[in-house]
Every structure is written in structure tokens, then in C-alpha cells.
């Protein structure tokens, strides 16, 4: 099936190029230009042999099916500068500028018309997209700061209704830098009824992806989309198309049950928390098949293969509350700056979903959370399960490795805003901080710095007019271990929660990032044991740790939550036109975003990337393939009309100049301009193809 879908993608995309050339062919015939060759596919010459499947000459035109099924081309008499020109009336160069313009525009027009037709065919069949229901929200992201929550369904962005996640993500990617957008979501209220919530969100440049984003991803459904052969899930009998109705966990401490009615994204977060904890036992699932019949499956943790990079098996973080997500029900229970010490009387060095599930009774309505100052808060158990993932992720942002300022440089940003030695740095430019990052990360006007003095929390921003520069401080931060995974190398070596890592291979560490750098350097130099200096209760211990593979995966993938857009045949024409207008506008928005550097060129797709996309959507169904081909056809049509040399729009620009000045542009000038454009396009094609291949092979 994969090979069939790859061929469908190649043939479909090739057909769009053929449609483009067909437009040129029909227009040339209409104005009386002699067409020497009309080819479907390409026919490269190999040792004097033209690689073709079929060739037939009818009148003045040779019709060819080339061996390579990638588009096609039209060869018109007297079209190229090197072609012999006799001045005959049926040569391209002999036609008026308006007639030649008609021929040039016809290719793009065919693509635009064909795109509308494909849209109109696809929508009556029903086209599925990831829905606008949100999955996990990235910590400290614009979405997190705006109070968006997992399970929210986005209704509109900047007043524009959003039906699917692709549309939502594209609109965010093409938004202007620092634009404050109104986003409306639908979420479950306290009484269980759905309610509309409106908030503001400001996209930020995601440097890893090279585009504007707010830190969201689509929600997963409970439907299994892939099962890795030989994996623990496959061995247990899980199959593609199954729907997971519930998870349960059995450990040495007894069964752990999830609350009823928990959203699947939260159920899956509990599964990940259980796997990450390293506990032994089994995962119990109830699944249903397409007919609705249910069955129970059991996956022993012993059957789950440990893979991935070799790790210590520790979680570094803390118990001090740095921030609570705006709008979270946990804001009333976790004061900023408070240090968490216990859950229902059990001492903890952090708080995550698994600790809440395993340390509290399943029928409890509240969880008593204790703090270092002796106070406590009775937190609704369900709100806590909904609000935390791993330690320091979710609604609560926790810190423990808090950098202490040891020195402030004169004239620096830190001196300007009033930082002093002894202050604790809590946040820098919206994120947690670490010693080396504080020392070297440039800050820009408006970036926020949050710190704690002996008496209060202070927040200040880099003043306007200050050139980008580091904060200007020296710091030191303990690297505190808050969790040790069961069965990990750290557990075997005797590392305990609460330990502080002071040195790697005898070299002192300044903070968490410094630890990562030094640990990676030692591991690269030697694949054996790593010597760690540990501080525990005022004593110094030297421990030898040999990292091991710890990642545990069931070998199962889940389909995104889907929304299917299906229309009547009459509505499909309107829908096709609307989609064509939207995707046409997005080309110009993309060009603007590229010019502003809000979108990186590596996000463009070349032939390899387009075929890969086509193959993936062909896997999703024929209607989705038609939709993507329609989108590509619209893009191909609009792009070809851009006034760039070599493209049809570039030729149209020369024709406009010819019309205005009364004579053609000098052919030598045209040749030089086209040569320069050709070099640029080849360079861009190589760049884009390189990134296509990187994405293809992960």
C-alpha cells in the first residue's frame, strides 16, 4: 500500500504540472502558435536515445509520453532565444504582447480552475482534518500564559472561525511578530456544561521550527493508528482501529485507577507518567473494536523494551512554585514562592500526576498538600490530576535549582534594574533560568526578569532603548535531584531524591545547563561510568554511575482527534472557491512572513517534500489526497504568476515593459536576468530539497 500511495502522490503532482502545460498548449493553439512538442512526462536523452514510452506526430505537433512521469512541457516554435526564428506568423515571437501574455497566463489559470474543481470533488466525499481540540500545552508558551488548557476547542482566532487544526496552525504561523490576537475557545465548565472563553495570545517565533507559534498541538483521540510489530502492544493484542476505553495500572503497591470521565489526553499523560516512573507491574486496558465489542488486555511492564539514549534516570527540578497558569483552579492553592513538601502526609520532592494518583485514595475529593512553612492546602484531587503532568510541567511551574546571584557587573542590565548579590533568580524572559544561561543569554527591551529578595518577589523589564545584552551577573545554582526512576542507573548507584550534584568527573558544576554540558562531554569521551560528586545532608559523596537506556514505549500510536468536513455537491463549489481564495492569499502572507523572518526558508517544501506529503495524505484517504492536490494546484498557479524571472510572471513583466516602451527588452538583458534567476532557483531548490530529506529521515 505504501508503494501504491507513493505512486499516487507522484502521478497526482505530475498531473498538476501537466494541467499547467495543457493550459499553455490550448492557449497557444487558440492564438495560432505552432506547437512542436506536447509532452506528458519528461524524455531525457540517454546515449542518443530519447527515454519515452510513446510518441505520435499529428500535424505540426509531436505528442509524447515520457519515461519520467513528472509533469510535462510544451515546446512552441520560436519561443526560446536560441530557437531559429524566421518571422513566420505561427512563431511565438511573432505574436503580439497581449497574445503571448494570454498564453503565459493560461497555464496558471488552468491550475486555479483545476484547484477549484478538485476542492469541489473532495468535499462531497468528506475531508478529515485534526480538530481544533487542543492537546498538551507547552509550559511557559504563549498559549500557557494566555490560560489555554488541554481539552479546549478553539472556535475562532482574531475573529476568523477555525474548523480544523491545520487552518489554525497556518494562521498562527503567518501572523505578524508581536501581534496580540483574540482567541476564543470552548471548554467544559465547573458544572460540566460547555462554555465559551475569550482570551488574548501573542505568538512568538519558535526557533526550532522556524515559524510563529503559541505552543499548542492537536489532541489525540483514543483510536489506535499504528502498532509496531513485535512491540509490547502488539504482543498484548492491540490492533489498528481499536479504541482505548480506559487505562488501569497495577504496581507492587496495589492497583491505581484513573478518575471516571477523564479526557483521553489526560489518560495518556497518566500512562506516560507511569512509564517514566520506572515502576514495575502491568498496564490494564479495556478496548473496543469497530463493531463496538470490548475486550480487556494486559501489558506487563517486563515485556516493554527499554530503548533510546542512555540516561541517568533522574528528574531535576524542585518544589518551589515559580508560577501557576493563568485561569487554573490551582492558583488559589499554590502561592508563588511556596515550597511543596508533602502530599497527604507523604514527603515528596516534587509533584506530578503519578504521585497524586499513587499517594492518594481514588475516592478522595481533596488532596492535602503541605508546604515548607508549615501551612497546607486542601486541593481538589480532580483539579490536581487535570493540572499536573511530570514534575514542573502542566499548570504548575516549579523550580528548585534556583540560581543565587553571586556578583553584579557595574553598568549591566542587572545593575540597572536593581539585582543584588544574594537574590534568587526565578525567571528570565518568560522561562526558568540557569547559571550559564543567565551569564550569556542576550536580553532585549521588554524582556521580564523575576527574582526573590529576602523580603519579596520582584519583577522588572529590560528598559526600552537598551541594546541587547546579557543580564550581567554571575550565579551559582545547586543541581537538585527531585526524582529517581525505579530501575535506573541512578537508583543502582544510590542517588536519592534531594541530593545535589556538585561535580562531574571532579569538575564543579555551576547549574543545570552546566551539568548537561559537562556530563555530555564526559560521555562522548568515554562510554563507561561517570564519576559524580554528590552533596547530601552536608556530606560529600563520590558515586560511579553507568547510564543505561530507560525510555519505555508500548509501540502504539494514536490518531489525532478528527473533524470531517463534508458538503453537498452544490455547497462544494462554494467551498472550493473559498478554499482557493484562502490558499491563494496565504502565498502572499507566506512571502511577507519570509521577508520579516517570521518563517524560516527551511519550512518550504520542494519536490521530495511534496511527494512525501502526498504519500502521507494518500494514506489518510483519496478525498484527502484530492484536497492536498487542489491546494498544491492553487499554489502552483499563484506562484507561477509572481513577477520573478523564469516564472510565467517574470515573462509577463518583460511583456509589460515591451508594451510600455514599444519594443522588446534586449535579449542579452533578458538572458542575463534569466541566468541569475536560474542560479537563485537552483540554489533554493537544493536548499529546500536538503531540508526535505532531513525531514523525510527524521
Image: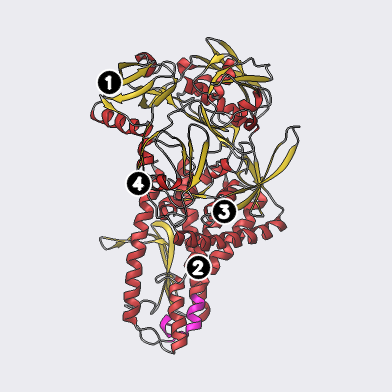
Q: Nearer the viewer, mark 3 or mark 1?
A: 1
Instruction: Identify the residue position indicated by label 2 in the image.
Output: 22
Q: Is 495 in the magenta?
A: no
Expressed as whole percent of the image width and height from the top left, the position of residue 528 reads 26, 22
User: Which residue does the image show at 40% across and 70% down from the upper left?
Assistant: 646
Q: Establish if 362 lies above or below 446.
A: above
Q: Which residues are the magenta region?
A: 89-103
Q: Are marks 3 and 1 in contact (CB under 8 Å)?
A: no
Q: What is the x, y in percent for residue 577?
A: 64, 62
- On screen, residue 488 above or below 10: above
The disc, 3 or 1, on the residue closer to the chain's N-terminal end is: 3
Q: CA distance from mark 2 to mark 3?
A: 33 Å
**Residue 426 shown left or right of residue 353 in the figure:** left
Within 10 Å of disc 4 (Cα), the crowding (few <14, some 14-19, many 20+) is few
The tag earlier along the polypeptide, 2 or 3, is 2
Mark number for residue 171? 3
Are discs 2 and 3 less than 8 Å apart at CB? no
Determine whether the residue tagged by mark 1 lies in a helix, strand or loop: loop
Q: Residue at coordinates 31% horizontally, 80% vertically from top-left?
A: 668
Select label 4 or label 3 by which is in front. 4
Instruction: Give the residue pinned by disc 4.
Output: 410
Amino acid at each position: 500500500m505504501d508503494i501504491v500511495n507513493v505512486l499516487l502522490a507522484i502521478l497526482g503532482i505530475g498531473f498538476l504540472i501537466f494541467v499547467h502545460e495543457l493550459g499553455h498548449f490550448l492557449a497557444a493553439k487558440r492564438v495560432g502558435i505552432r506547437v512542436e512538442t506536447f509532452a506528458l512526462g519528461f524524455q531525457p536523452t540517454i546515449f542518443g536515445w530519447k527515454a519515452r514510452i510513446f510518441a505520435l506526430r499529428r500535424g505540426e505537433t509531436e505528442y509524447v509520453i515520457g519515461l519520467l512521469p513528472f509533469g510535462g512541457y510544451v515546446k512552441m516554435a520560436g519561443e526560446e532565444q536560441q530557437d531559429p526564428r524566421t518571422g513566420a506568423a505561427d512563431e511565438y515571437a511573432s505574436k503580439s504582447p497581449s497574445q503571448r501574455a494570454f498564453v503565459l497566463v493560461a497555464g496558471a489559470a488552468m491550475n486555479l480552475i483545476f484547484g477549484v474543481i478538485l476542492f469541489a470533488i473532495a468535499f462531497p466525499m468528506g475531508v478529515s482534518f485534526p480538530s481544533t481540540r487542543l492537546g498538551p500545552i507547552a509550559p511557559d508558551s504563549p498559549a500557557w500564559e494566555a490560560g489555554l488548557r488541554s481539552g479546549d476547542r478553539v472556535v475562532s482566532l482574531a475573529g476568523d472561525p477555525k474548523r480544523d487544526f491545520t487552518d489554525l496552525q497556518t494562521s498562527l504561523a503567518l501572523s505578524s511578530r508581536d501581534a496580540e490576537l483574540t482567541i476564543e475557545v470552548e471548554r467544559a465548565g465547573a458544572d460540566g456544561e460547555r462554555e465559551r472563553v475569550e482570551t488574548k495570545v501573542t505568538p512568538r517565533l519558535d526557533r526550532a521550527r522556524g515559524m510563529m507559534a503559541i505552543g499548542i498541538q492537536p489532541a489525540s483521540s483514543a483510536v489506535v493508528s499504528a502498532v509496531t510489530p513485535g512491540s509490547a502492544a502488539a504482543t498484548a493484542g492491540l490492533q489498528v482501529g481499536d479504541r482505548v476505553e480506559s487505562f488501569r495500572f497495577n504496581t507492587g503497591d496495589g492497583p491505581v485507577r484513573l478518575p471516571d470521565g477523564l479526557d483521553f489526553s489526560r489518560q495518556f499523560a497518566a500512562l506516560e507518567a507511569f512509564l517514566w516512573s520506572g515502576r514495575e507491574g502491568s498496564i490494564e486496558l479495556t478496548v473496543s473494536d469497530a463493531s463496538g465489542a470490548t475486550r480487556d488486555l494486559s501489558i506487563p511492564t517486563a515485556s516493554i523494551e527499554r530503548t533510546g539514549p542512555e540516561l541517568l534516570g533522574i528528574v531535576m527540578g524542585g518544589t518551589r512554585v515559580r508560577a501557576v497558569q493563568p485561569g487554573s483552579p490551582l492558583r488559589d492553592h499554590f502561592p508563588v514562592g511556596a515550597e511543596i513538601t508533602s502530599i497527604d502526609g507523604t514527603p515528596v520532592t516534587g509533584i506530578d500526576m503519578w504521585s497524586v494518583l499513587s499517594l492518594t485514595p481514588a475516592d478522595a475529593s481533596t488532596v492535602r498538600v503541605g508546604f515548607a512553612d508549615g501551612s497546607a492546602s486542601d486541593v481538589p484531587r480532580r483539579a490536581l490530576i487535570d493540572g499536573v503532568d511530570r514534575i514542573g510541567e502542566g499548570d504548575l511551574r516549579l523550580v528548585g535549582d534556583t540560581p543565587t546571584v553571586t556578583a553584579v557587573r557595574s553598568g549591566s542590565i542587572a545593575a540597572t534594574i536593581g539585582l543584588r548579590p544574594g537574590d534568587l533568580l526565578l525567571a528570565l524572559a518568560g522561562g526558568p533560568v540557569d547559571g550559564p544561561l543567565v551569564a550569556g543569554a542576550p536580553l532585549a527591551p521588554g524582556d521580564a526578569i523575576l527574582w526573590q529578595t529576602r523580603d519579596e518577589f520582584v519583577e522588572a523589564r529590560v528598559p526600552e532603548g537598551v541594546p541587547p545584552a546579557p543580564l550581567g551577573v554571575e550565579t551559582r545554582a545547586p543541581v537538585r535531584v527531585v526524582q529517581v526512576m525505579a530501575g535506573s542507573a541512578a537508583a543502582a548507584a544510590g542517588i536519592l531524591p534531594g541530593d545535589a550534584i556538585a561535580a562531574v568527573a571532579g569538575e564543579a558544576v555551576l547549574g543545570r545547563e552546566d551539568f548537561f554540558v559537562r556530563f555530555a562531554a564526559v560521555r562522548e569521551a568515554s562510554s563507561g561510568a561517570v564519576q559524580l560528586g554528590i552533596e547530601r545532608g552536608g556530606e560529600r559523596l563520590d558515586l560511579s554511575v553507568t547510564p543505561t537506556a530507560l525510555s519505555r514505549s508500548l509501540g502504539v500510536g494514536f490518531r489525532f482527534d478528527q473533524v470531517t468536513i463534508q458538503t453537498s455537491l452544490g455547497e462544494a463549489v462554494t467551498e472550493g472557491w473559498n478554499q482557493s481564495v484562502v490558499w491563494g492569499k496565504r502565498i502572499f502572507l507566506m512571502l511577507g512572513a519570509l521577508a520579516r523572518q517570521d518563517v524560516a526558508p527551511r519550512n518550504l517544501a520542494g519536490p521530495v517534500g511534496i511527494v512525501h506529503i502526498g504519500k502521507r495524505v494518500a494514506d489518510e484517504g483519496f478525498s484527502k489526497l484530492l484536497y492536498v492536490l487542489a491546494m498544491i494546484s492553487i499554489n502552483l498557479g499563484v506562484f507561477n504568476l509572481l513577477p520573478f524571472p523564469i516564472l510565467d510572471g517574470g515573462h509577463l513583466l518583460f511583456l509589460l515593459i515591451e508594451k510600455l516602451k514599444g519594443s522588446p527588452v534586449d535579449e542579452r538583458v533578458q538572458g542575463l536576468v534569466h541566468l541569475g534567476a536560474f542560479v537563485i532557483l537552483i540554489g533554493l531548490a537544493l536548499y529546500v530539497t536538503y531540508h526535505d530529506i532531513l525531514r523525510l529521515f527524521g
